[in-house]
Structure formats: structure tokens, C-alpha cells
Amino acid sequence: MKRLFSSIVFFLSLAVSAADDDNPAADQENTDQPAAVEKTEQKNGTDEMLGKATPFRKDVLFKVNEAISEIEKNCPSAINKFSAQDQEKIIKSLISSMNSGMEYLPANTAVPEDVKKRAKPLPSIIISAQKILYLRLDEFNAETYAKLKDDCTNTSKLANKPVGLIIDLRDCQGFDYESCLKSVALFCAPEKLPKTENLELPIRILNIPVMVLVGNKTKGDGEIFTRLMLENGQCLVSGGGTAGSPFKKVKVVLKSGNILLIPAVPECLSSIPTSQLIPALNVVPYPQVEYEKLSATAGSEDTDKCLLRAIDLLISLEALHREQKKRSNETPKKSK
């Protein structure tokens, strides 16, 4: 009868609830001395942990205890039917319900480490009959940021600027938040960016329509870059849903042997959701045309449906803007 209750008590560091203290009959049911000693040790340990708990945790734990205690008294069959696997499902569901990007894994689960790609910066390309500037970033780091800044600066000085910019992040993975924020600053007004200490952000350089391409390989700072650009109205996003892991996760092994993966969220980025980003323009993001092929072969963008859709949209937006400007100039001025 007590299996589910004891498991959750152990996992959440619960103290013995007031409901159990008020039920002497329940205490008399178990007269086994080793179990009593174990219960006393557990109570002492959890009492100490609860003394440091936040009001939120104390309130949640009390309510969980209260509800389970009533179920045990009034509907014991509901408790008896649960197995150890069911208990694990309940705990996993509780962790997932917090919507904080945390994961609860069974003991001895192999957790792959995030490996830095160490991607080199790729030169920008003018594609689609010299109309669109294409930038591919497979990782945000000091080198790729410096190249991005140079490309944006050079583009801003052109007499005939491209009608739009495509930033391809479909294979972008990493956790260099500093380079990511500095890259966003090249396109956004500084007052729209997260406040950061000891980080000098560059001034805005380029102001042309931007399309950002993403997919399920877009992970970490690639997701953060896209969200900041989107929330500040600086781009449209096309492709498929991202990986849903904008922050590096810290592995914590619990006393039970089970594993928690907890996102390490910098304070300045605490407003960024830990969930998957779903583009408004849903286009199959892969296969992604190879950069070498795109830079060497004219018209190779036609083999990449996601890229081709972004090109068509940017050119269409430019055509609409040009037509509106033309009509505005043709409208006769009203006489005073």
C-alpha cells in the first residue's frame, strides 16, 4: 500500500506528511524495527532538506502528500495496482509537466555529451541572379561571428544591396551564447536585446529582409539566435521544428541512480523558452544543399526546396514593396 507513497517521498525529499502523523493506526500497522529505523533516518534527512526548501516546494510537497494520503485511505486499490514502472512514469510525468526542458531518465542511461563542431566560417554567397545574400552558419563561435560581421559590413556598403538575406542554421549546433548575442546585435536595435554584463555588443549594421532556415538539427545557440530575431521582428523563419534544446544540460545522478538533465540557463536568457521552435512557414528542411555545390554551381539552389521557398518569398516581398513605392509616387499630390 505504501510503495507509491514511499517512492515519491524518497524522490522529492518529502518529510512524513501531517496526514500520516495524525493516523496512529497506520503507524501501528508496521512494527518491523529495521523499517522503523529506516523511516526515522529518512525523516531526519528530509526534514533537514525541507528546512532549506522554498515556499513553493513546501506547498507543492504538502499538497502531493495530502492527496496521496487520502487516496490510500479511501481507495487503496488504486495504489495497490501500481508497479515500480508505474511509479517511474508518474515521476517522469511530474518532471515533464514543469515545462522547463528537464529530462528524467532511468539509471545507467547513456547520455551522449555535446561535442563542439569547431565549424569554420563560410564565405557569404550571392545567389539567385545576384539578388539574395546567403549566409550559412553551422556554429556560433568567435571566428564565425567575425566573418558574419565582415559580410554584413561589406553588404551594407554596396550601392545595389541584395533584396534579402538568408541565414541558414539548419545544421547549426553549439552553446557559445556570447557569440550568438553579438551576432543578433548585427541585425537588432540594442534596446531590444537581453541585458548582459561584461559583454559589449556591436551596433546594428544591416537592415534588409531576413529569412532564417531551421530544422531538427538546429540546436543550442542556433535556436536562441532564431528566437531573438523572430521576437524582435527582424526575420521570418522557415523549415521544420528545431531540436528544442537551446541550453546545455547538466547531468545530475540522483540517490536512486536515476538521472536528471537540467538546462543551465544564463540569467540574461531566462526568458527564452526551452521548448521546440516551430516555424510559421513549415517547409521540409532537408536535404540541405551542400555549401560547396551552392557556391560553385549556378542554379544549384533549385535542388533545396526549403532554400528555394525562402528565395521566392524574399523576391516576392521585394516585388510588392517596389510596386507599392511606384504607386505611391504616381499618386497625384492634393492641392493645398
Image (cartoon, helix red, strand yellow):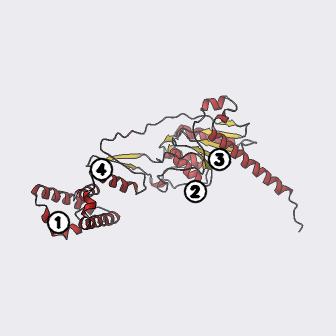
Q: Report if residue 59 lies within the magenta region.
A: no
The tag on residue 218 is: none
Q: Residue furthest right?
A: 335
> What kind of element bears circle 2?
helix
> What kind of element bears circle 4?
helix
Pick the quarter of the image with the C terminus: bottom right
Along the line of sight, the residue nearer the viewer: 91 or 84: 84
Indicate which label's residue lies in the foreground, 3 or 4. Answer: 4
Are dots 1 and 4 in contact, CB under 8 Å?
no
> What kind of element bears circle 1?
helix
Indicate which label's residue lies in the foreground, 4 or 2. Answer: 4
Task: Name the residue type under label 4.
Answer: Gln
Along the line of sight, the residue nearer the viewer: 28 or 36: 28
Q: Which residue is mark 4?
A: 85
Q: State how far apart marks 3 and 4 are (Cα).
A: 48 Å
- In the rendered view, would you say 249 is above or below 63? above
